[in-house]
């Protein structure tokens, strides 16, 4: 594999279609090691050849297209099948890709050039570093002076935040036009290929996943960010392809989507409508395309919506989760459906636990901390281990985990930490008007911060790519890189 290969939209699409499809087909089989060994061989070869930009990009892209436990959509922790994809193969508790990230960072630590401290990406990195340090300090204090702090929670969340910082700093230290344009230009064909491979495995090969007892499409974690592919419609050299694949993506989500999926797609579609009808930047860049698109979508969008309602057989999971989303607008918390109710109850309990503890309220319990059901909101919910909590947490009544950002972050970092992350969600929401890659802040930080490292790698990859316009087009020091001439 050479640099010219990574500069071709079509070649990248074919390569990652085959990789994702192989990861899905070989899920649970040791044959998956054939794909994984190939991927590690390629990355190590580029490192050995001192082609660090390509090594970093391939390393991140192989993590993004791997199959993780979350792909199985199981709420249980005791997944017994072997997981042998690039992001999951490990020695003991240590995944190999952790080691590769650390090696890449060590090899580039002496670089003098790095990302400007004025960029939004760098500022987000500093905010996350603050959360990590404060969480470690408070956690250490809790282990020394308080009772019942849980070491397994430290490993879970500590590993996540440590590897997140390592990978973000790796991108910051290697901030060049070559690497930046590679991420910016290669991520769209990769996410498109992932959607196609997922569809092929489901509709052609009949490979399905499950959420609890409900069947659904078996989806790699990158599919969680799939609406970004449609959002890049106007900047793509293959607009018809983007539109067709995006409609296929939405159709698969109608067959089975989580509540987060529904909200993420809905917000993404609103941004797409903004780009279509209100974006002055796109109108200046693509005047003929925008005028034509406005006419076409004015007619096409109502037809698609009416057609979907009239002829598409919505999946049971989609309908259940759609009802979950609508229940959020109930007049009383007690009327909210179980899934969002548990998240709301967790956040309210964390607040109640710390209402007389300003440090805990503002900065959280730190790593290893826990909350109790002081409001008795979990009463009557049945077996809480079915909701993802460890059996020890349920038996002791000391819960060390949340279910998403708004539950987990207040526990670990307080509502001050949550406010910090929400500030950057707001900043990136504004930046999404300029770069659609910035939309990754929603599926990552808004909903799944601390959920798994793959979501984090996907998130920072897109947010790094979002710096392309400011970092390359507006910075004369970075203009001379030939890798900007990408699509062939």
Image (cartoon, rainbow, N blue to C red):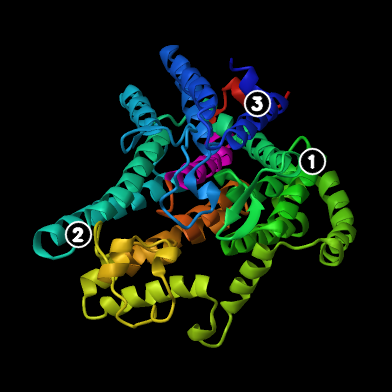
Is label 3 in a helix, a strand or a loop? helix
Q: Which residue is mark 3?
A: 15
Question: Would you say residue 14 is visible in this rendering?
Answer: yes
Q: Which residue is mark 1?
A: 239
Give the mark toward the camera: 3 or 1: 3
Which residues are drawn in magenta? 453-473
Q: Which residue is mark 2?
A: 138
Q: Is residue 225 above or below residue 464?
A: below
Q: Main secondary structure of the magenta part?
A: helix
Taking the view exactly as shown, the residue that stands out farthest to the bottom is: 331
Of the numbered discs 2 and 1, the one sitting upstream in the chain is: 2
Q: Is residue 468 magenta?
A: yes
Residue at position x 55%, y 39% in the image: 465
Residue at position x 28%, y 74% in the image: 372
Residue at position x 38%, y 31% in the image: 173
Q: Is residue 482 magenta?
A: no
Image quadrant where residue 285 sits: top right
Residue at position x 73%, y 23% in the image: 488
């Amino acid at each position: 594999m050479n640099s010219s290969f990574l500069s071709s939209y079509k070649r990248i699409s074919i390569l990652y279609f085959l990789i994702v499809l192989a990861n899905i087909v070989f899920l649970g089989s040791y044959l998956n090691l054939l794909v994984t060994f190939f991927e590690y061989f390629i990355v190590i070869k580029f490192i050995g050849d001192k082609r660090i930009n390509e090594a970093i990009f391939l390393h991140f892209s192989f993590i993004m297209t791997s199959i993780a436990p979350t792909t199985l959509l199981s709420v249980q922790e005791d997944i017994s099948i072997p997981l042998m994809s690039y992001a999951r193969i490990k020695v003991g508790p240590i995944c190999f890709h952790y080691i590769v990230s650390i090696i890449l960072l060590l090899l580039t630590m002496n670089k003098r050039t790095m990302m400007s401290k004025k960029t939004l990406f760098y500022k987000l990195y500093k905010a996350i570093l603050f959360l990590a340090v404060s969480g470690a300090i408070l956690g250490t204090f809790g282990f020394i002076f308080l009772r019942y702090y849980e070491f397994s929670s430290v490993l879970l969340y500590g590993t996540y935040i440590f590897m997140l910082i390592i990978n973000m700093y790796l991108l910051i230290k290697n901030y060049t036009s070559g690497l930046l344009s590679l991420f910016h230009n290669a991520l769209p064909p990769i996410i498109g290929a992932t959607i196609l491979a997922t569809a092929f495995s489901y509709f052609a090969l009949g490979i399905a996943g499950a959420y609890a007892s409900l069947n659904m499409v078996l989806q790699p974690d990158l599919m969680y960010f799939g609406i970004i592919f449609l959002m890049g419609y106007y900047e793509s050299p293959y607009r018809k392809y983007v539109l067709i694949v995006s409609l296929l993506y939405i159709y698969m989500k109608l067959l089975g989507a989580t509540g987060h999926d529904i909200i993420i797609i809905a917000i993404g579609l609103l941004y797409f409508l903004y780009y279509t009808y209100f974006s002055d930047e796109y109108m200046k860049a693509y005047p003929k395309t925008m005028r034509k698109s406005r006419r076409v979508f004015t007619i096409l969008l109502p037809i698609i919506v009416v057609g979907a309602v009239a002829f598409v057989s919505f999946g049971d999971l989609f309908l259940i989760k759609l009802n979950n989303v609508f229940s959020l607008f109930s007049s009383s918390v007690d009327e909210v459906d179980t899934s969002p109710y548990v998240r709301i109850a967790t956040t309210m309990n964390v607040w109640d636990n710390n209402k007389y503890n300003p440090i805990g309220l503002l900065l959280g319990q730190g790593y290893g901390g826990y909350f109790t059901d002081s409001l008795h909101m979990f009463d009557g919910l049945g077996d809480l281990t079915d909701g993802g909590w460890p059996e020890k947490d349920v038996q002791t009544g000391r819960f060390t985990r949340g279910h998403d950002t708004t539950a987990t972050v207040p526990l670990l970092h307080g509502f001050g930490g949550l406010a910090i992350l929400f500030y950057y969600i707001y900043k990136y929401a504004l930046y999404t008007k300029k770069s659609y890659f910035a939309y990754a802040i929603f599926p990552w930080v808004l909903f799944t911060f601390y959920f798994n490292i793959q979501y984090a790698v996907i998130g920072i990859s897109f947010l790094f790519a979002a710096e392309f316009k400011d970092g390359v087009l507006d910075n004369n020091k970075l203009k001379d890189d030939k890798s900007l001439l990408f699509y062939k």
